[in-house]
Each structure stands twice: as C-alpha cells, then as structure tokens.
Amino acid sequence: MSSWKVSEPALDLNSCAREPIRTPGAIQPYGLILVLDPATLRVKERALSRPDLIETFGDPLGQTVDVVLGATLAACRPTLEALKPDTSQFLGAHTIGEHGRHQVLAHRTGNDLIVELEEPVSGEPGSLEDLYPAIRRFMGAIERVASTQELCELAAVQIRELTGFDRTLVYQFDKEWNGAVVAEDGNGVLPSYLDLRFPESDIPAQARALYRQNRVRLIADSDYQAVPLVRDAVNADAPPTDLSPSMLRSVSPVHLQYMRNMGTGASMSVSLLREGELWGLISCHNQAPKRVPYHVRTACEFIGQILSLQITLKERAAVVEERIARRAIQVRLLGRMAGDQDFMAALGRDQQSLLALTQSVGAAIVHRGECILHGECPDEPQVMSLVQWLTAQQHHGDLVCTDRLPLEWAPADAFADVASGVLAISISQIHDSYVLWFRPEVVRTVRWGGDPRKEDTGLPLSPRTSFEGWKETVRKQSLPWNDVDRDAALELRTAIVDIVLRKAEEMAALNEQLLRSNKELEAFSYSVSHDLRAPFRHIVGYSELLWASAGERLNDSEKRFLDTIVESAQSAGTLVDDLLSFSQMGRSTMGQIAMDMTALVEDVRHKLDMEYDGRTIHWVVPHLPRVQADPGMLRLVWQNLLSNAIKFTRDTPNTVIEVGHYRTDTENVFYVQDNGCGFDMRYVDKLFGVFQRLHHADEYEGTGIGLANVHRIITRHGGRTWAEGQVGVGAKFYFTIPFATGDKV
C-alpha cells in the first residue's frame, strides 16, 4: 500500500497541456488535406500522404477546387461555397484516378476552408446502412437496461463488435477530471484496465476541449510518420492553420509515446457528453496498427450519442427523484419551523429529517453563541472553533462545502473520524450563525493505472512509462457532497432567511403598534392624573374646613365618615401623584453623568429616617462603585427600594437591611436585601408591574407604582431588574447598570 501527495516537480511536465495540438502543422499519413481560401476556393496549403498524386495531377497549391486533383471535387463547389463557419459537411466518396475512392469531408473554420480526403480502408463497408442491424440490436438492448453501469457495459461490447479492437473501455471523469474505467470488453490481448483510475494530467484541459468538439478521434498507428503541411509563398507568414475539426490531424508526439508505453499500436475514442459537458469517453485500443473505416466510425459516433443521451436521462431521472425526496424532507422541517417561535430549536427537534436532508451522520446548529449538536459530530468547542474558521472564509459565500476538511484546516485532524466532510450554510450576515452537517472519514483504496505522479525522466517532455496497477490509500476524506446535497442546504438557508425576515417584519410591526399604544397610554395617563390632582385636593381641603367649622356639632358616626372621606381623598391623591410620576418617567430626557453610588445611597437613607422613627434598623452599606447614569432617576430607584425594605420589615424585631454590589463581564449589579415579610416566588413576575401588590392594602400602605418605576428607570439605562424572596424570611431586589449605558426606550 502506498499513499502520496502531489508536489511541484522541478521539471515542467505540464508543458504537454500547452502543446499546439490544434495547430500541429501536419497530418496522419492516410489521405490528404487541402486548405482553401473561403472567398476564392483556391488552395493555399496542402498535405499529401501520396507524393505520386503530384506526379499525376500536379501540385494543388494555387489551384481552385474546380481543377485540383483532376477536377475530382468540381461538383462540390456549391456545397463548399455555402458552408457556414464552424460547421462540417460530409461530401461523399470520390474516386481520385487510380488511387481509389476517398471519403471527403469539408470543415469551415474562422479563416479557412479545410477539405480532407481519407484513403479507402481494405474491407470498408459500402455504406452506413450495412451497419444498421448492429445499431438496431443496440437500440433494442438499451431499452431493457436499468442503470448507467449496464449502459456502459453494453456500449463497450457493441463498440468492440463493430470495430474489432482488442480492448474497449468506458472511461468516466470525476469532478477533478481524473478518469475511472467503469466498463470494459476485450479479447485478452491487452491487459484489463477495469476499475483503474487515471490522473487528470493524462488528458489535460485542452485535449478535453477537443474531445467536446470532435466526438470521434482515430490514431491508426502510434508509429506513423506525420505528413507536413506545405504553404504557398503568399501565406508563408500566416499563423499556423487550425486543424481541430480534421480527422487526419496529426497528434502530439507525447501522446504517441504515451500509446507506445501502454503497448497499443492504434486507438480510437468516442466522446460521451452530458448536457454539453464531457462526461467520459469510449476508448478503444489495439495492439497492432488498425484503421477504422469512415462508416464504422460514424456508427460508433451514433452509438456514442445514444449512450450520452441515455446517461443524461438516467442521471437526470435519478437526480429528480432524489430532489423530490429531499424536498419532502425540507417541507417537514419548514412545517416545524414556521409554527414555532424558536425556529432554530424547532429545526433540531426532527433530528432524523435534519440529517436526511443532506445524507449526513451529524449536524450542528450555531445561533447567537448557542451550539446545539445532533447525531455524530465534533464536540461543542471543536464546532465553535470550526465556525470561527468558516467565518474567516468570507470568499466562500453563503455555503462552504468540502469532503476533505482535515486537509484544508489542520485542527480538523482531531475529529476526522466523525467530520472529514462538512457542509455549512450561513444564515446571518450579522451573527456567526450556521447550520453544519458532517460526514465521517471513509478510508478506501484507489487503484491507479500506474503511479499518477509523472516521472522525471530528465527529458524536456515525456509521458509516464508505467501502467502497472498502483494503489493509493485515501484517508481523511468523506463521501463527496453532490449537487443535490448542496442545493438542499441552500434551499433550506433561503427558507430560514425568509422565516427570519418574516418574523422580523412581524416583530417590527408589533413594536411599532406597541410603541404607538404606549405613547397614547402615557398621554392619557398624564392627562387624567394631571386633571384629577385638583379635585382630590379640593375634597381634602373642603373636608378639613368642614371639620374645623362644624366638628363640634358632628356625632361620632359623622366624624368617622368625614375621616374616611379625607383618608380616601389623600390616598387617591397620592395614587394620582404616583401615576403622574410614572408617566413622566417614560417621557423625560435622560442626562447621564458619573455619580457616586455610595453617597447617593447614604443621602436617600438619611432622608428616609422619618419613615422608621422609633425603630432600630441595622444598615449594611459597603463602598459602591461610581456609575454613569441619570442622578434624578437613580435616586428614585434607591428611594423606592430602601423605602420598601423599611416598610416590609416594620414587624421584624431585629431588622437588617443590606445594600450590596458585584460585577459581571458587562454590568454592575446592585441589590437591596431585607429580612422582612418576604413574598411568594410564585408571584415574582407581578412585582414590577403597575398596580401589582402581593400584600393587602390594610397591611402595608402603597399604590403599587414604586417597583414599576424602578423597572422603567433601569430599563431605560439598558439594565435589568429581578427579585428573590421567601415568605417570612425576607426579600432581595436586584438591578443592573451596564458599563456602557444608554436610553433603551
């Protein structure tokens, strides 16, 4: 067993990818080529494999197509004149004197008109119709074939039967353009290459481009002597002629050596295209030189086109079926998310569907600093570290996909067994929010047709010489992600973003409505409170006047009624004042300054002395930090909290009221703790609401506005409020002031 990593050799072996294979300046020695001026149809370049043609007909250079080769092609003039650029036309079989019937093809390129005449082949069928029975058998057989693999096996057998080659391979490219032999038929003369892989460098990009352009290519003899193109003097300095469409075009000497190293004397290829892209090749090899007649090549090309169409249809059907299945999974997931406020948590409640969406074994949902793991995946710190790396890969866009994560990000080596492959979608432009899917390492052995590393022979350019089976152990890779996987992930991302946007729009509308309602309520509360102050004061005032003028004449019941009126009016007046203060709290402007919290607490405590006159209270007030806040508002906070502590401890013999403080990473936390009557924690949510009281009014005076004011003030500073309590033990009220405060209302 061996493993390898491609390294950059000192020798430039990639120069084969830059060879002028389109403009070789020569042809294979099995016919002749005439390069014509499209305007005049005059020969400006020629290559003749038979020198005696010149002796018989004279040199074609400078002659028009009407007279060249003894006027053999005169009848073809109208077709040649009508030929459009980048098209080819079969002109039939034409006899050239005693040299036999030649198959004539014409190709129109940008600046040239190429006419090639291919010499006859011994035993050549009379026409394509002679091969129709074999084609019909193939057409009937493919109707009974269910898979792409069976199609390839059938084509390998049929092509070898038609051509008589020693070995026929069906060769499929992967996404990196390495090729694998997926089907084979042979007579045993040449070794089997079934299941072997061949590196991308064996068929470089420019060669693959030619395979797309020309569906059939024949090299009849790997030891042939090329016939050079000869130009007339007028075109001596013109650019090299592009012979791309020509069957007789000479091929790279490197490729010929490659064939000889393989032990093949002749080869033919038929291109297999899927939706215009090169899917693979039908590659035919013969130990000895071998020419294939034009009609046989045409039949092979026809079979190749049928095979290409069938491969496309079957793969497309498989993809459509898989997409339908994934879409059904996605509908289930979206149904859960759409009906749940916490859509990210809802996404993870159906773990099976979440994993099946991309055929994964594990998934992680990272949203606003929270990480939720499902199935087999790295631990939370590893996932969060991976998310940081993904965030840094901004050029990858909304989706990152790899089946070899440890080779791209070294820390992933620690969890390669569960996550050698990762597919991740970003679901937020603001937060590091991702949905990630994981695939485990799949250790596999790949059989190459020879060491895929090109050998440094010391020569300027040479192909590899060995095609002996060479094994590579592939590690730290998962099964690859396909287009269906990626599209399913992207569609889910789109759906999630749509849900987020819709919920954001709904929330914005609700916030706007709530803000408008709050403003209306504040205005109403302010108006009512302001207008009610005077009537209640009048009631108290006139009641006191009545008591002063007629008190001696009133009986005990009447005096009690009058006292009740005064007390009720005073209580209502206090309530109105508190409501007015509460409404003003939301309307007033905050002015934040650096202030001494210790001094503020002591000042408030001193002014509350009258509230506990005659009582002994043990105060615990440590040194408190300075904060940035509105002094008037914060004074009201301390006044309410300390006043409540005094009030709710009046029945406690040994009263202790403690003021305290501690810090978090983002805020200062203050609290007031007492050992008074306390409260039931079941009702803690009511504490900071308007008019919310946890004790009877006849037990403890108050309007239920104070803590609501505390909550509003602290909220405007960007802080939080909460409380803890136990009946008969005491209560503890907290509030926070962030290090960077701001008006949040």
Image (cartoon, rainbow, N blue to C red):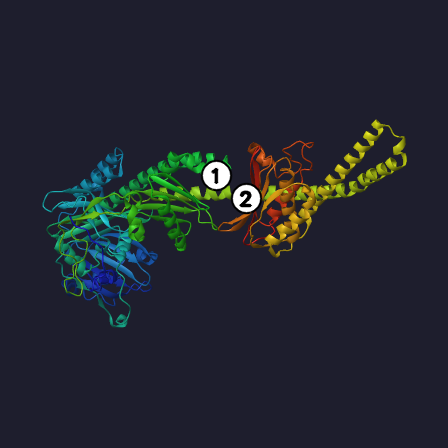
Within 10 Å of the Cα at label 1, are there few (<14), some (14-19), or many (20+) other Cα atoms?
Answer: some
- 658 horizontally vs 359: left or right: right
Q: SS class of the residue under badge 1?
A: helix
* Residue at position x 67%, y 32% in the image: 699
**In the picture, residue 238 is in which quadrant?**
bottom left
Within 10 Å of the Cα at label 2, are there few (<14), some (14-19), or many (20+) other Cα atoms?
Answer: few
**Disc 2/disc 1 C-alpha distance (Å):** 12 Å
Amino acid at the residue labelled 2: Ala
Residue for badge 2: 504
* Residue at position x 62%, y 42% in the image: 617
Earlier-in-chain disc, 2 versus 1: 1
Between 366 and 397, which is closer to the camera in this rendering? 366
Q: Is residue 63 above or below residue 493?
A: below
- 342 horizontally vs 462: left or right: right
Provide residue 388's location: percent of width, then percent of height: 39, 51
Residue for badge 1: 343
Amino acid at the residue labelled 1: Phe
Provide residue 545's location: percent of width, then percent of height: 87, 38
Q: Is residue 30 visible?
A: no
Between 301 and 149, which is closer to the camera in this rendering? 149
Q: Is residue 538 visible?
A: yes
Q: SS class of the residue under badge 2?
A: helix
